[in-house]
Amino acid sequence: MIVDKVGAPINQNDKAKPDTSHGVILYVEDVSVSFDGFKALNDLNLYINDGELRCLIGANGAGKTTLMDVITGKTRPDKGKVSFGQQVDLLELDEAEIARAGIGRKFQKPTVFEELSVFENLELSFAGDKGIITSLFHKLTSEQTDRIREILVTIGLVPETNYPAGRLSHGQKQWLEIGMLLVAEPRLLLVDEPVAGMTAQETERTAELLTSLAGKHSVVVVEHDMAFVRSIAKKVTVLHQGTVLAEGSMSEIQANPEVIKVYLGEEDA
Ligand code: ATP
């Protein structure tokens, strides 16, 4: 049997299960990343609890994207520890293995297949990294069809099931892409600027969607839209110069003089 580096068979449904018995799903400890001597992350510590929805904010260049890149294996830190639950060392895994272990990442720009229907886009996700051709000849089991129907309800796209994805609004494409990630049943979802370019109504719907995903999934949202962060955040982490400047409830963050000085002062907080 072929096994990956975490000892699990290479199969989309078999993941290295993170041990979250201590309530923490993601440990980032003393992580530093340098680019030509410039420290994009500087001894950063971050802990995400199992099932929580965390918002990550910080000015341009604070290190938010670099942190996501480290968690998903795109960038290797110079030092530090990153683990999924207590025992899955993410620094030992490549990007595909990290995705299979249960960490999904949603980039800012939606990348759905415009010619295919909403249903087919979700169907494709069952093929994982096996590719589009395999997927087109792969017949869904009734369980998989049920799962897709369930996801369509979650992402609010039941009426659009058979629409070509190209006809969806920007917001609907974003929800579809979140749905495509949900097919793999990730334990941790990293979502980059989900409401950029959305209408007020779409933004509100996205807040409901992300809030509804927390609990079953842990969700980390990177966002600049402070009104949106205010509407969903229970706990907020503020990054500044590659390290955690402050962490707490939105009201604690808004009252923190350091945060006001370096970040919120620039916003209409
Ligand atoms: P934004 O909100 O603008 O996306 P951010 O908080 O995501 O910002 P990062 O993209 O993580 O910030 O960047 C942190 C710092 O590291 C920035 O100063 C950036 O210029 C630098 N940086 C990021 N990636 C690289 C790279 N590949 N090479 C050199 N410098 C980089």
Image: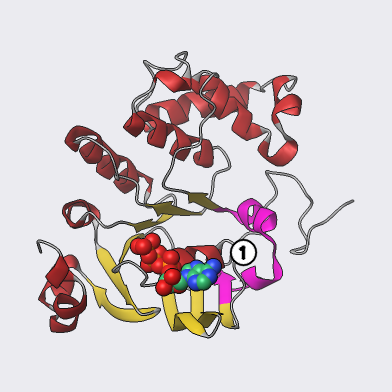
Between 123 and 226, the one nearer to me in the picture: 226
Ligand 1 is within 8 Å of the C-beta of the residue at disc 1: no
Say above or below: 160 vs 156. Answer: above
| Residue 164 on the magenta span | no
Q: Position of residue 114 (x, y in %)?
A: 51, 23
Residue at the limit of the structure toward the front, as seen here? 36
What residue would you read off at disc 1? 73
Say above or below: 188 vs 5. Answer: above
Between 215 and 98, the one nearer to me in the picture: 98
Which quarter of the picture shows residue 74?
bottom right
Q: Position of residue 239 (x, y in %)?
A: 33, 74
Q: From which residue to which does the magenta span run?
A: 82-103
Say above or below: 36 vs 5. Answer: below
Say above or below: 157 vs 126. Answer: above
| Residue 91 on the magenta span | yes
- Residue at 51%, 81% (x, y): give it: 31
Quarter of the figure with the C terminus:
bottom left
Q: Is residue 24 visible?
A: no
User: Quick check: which quadrant has ligand 1?
Assistant: bottom left
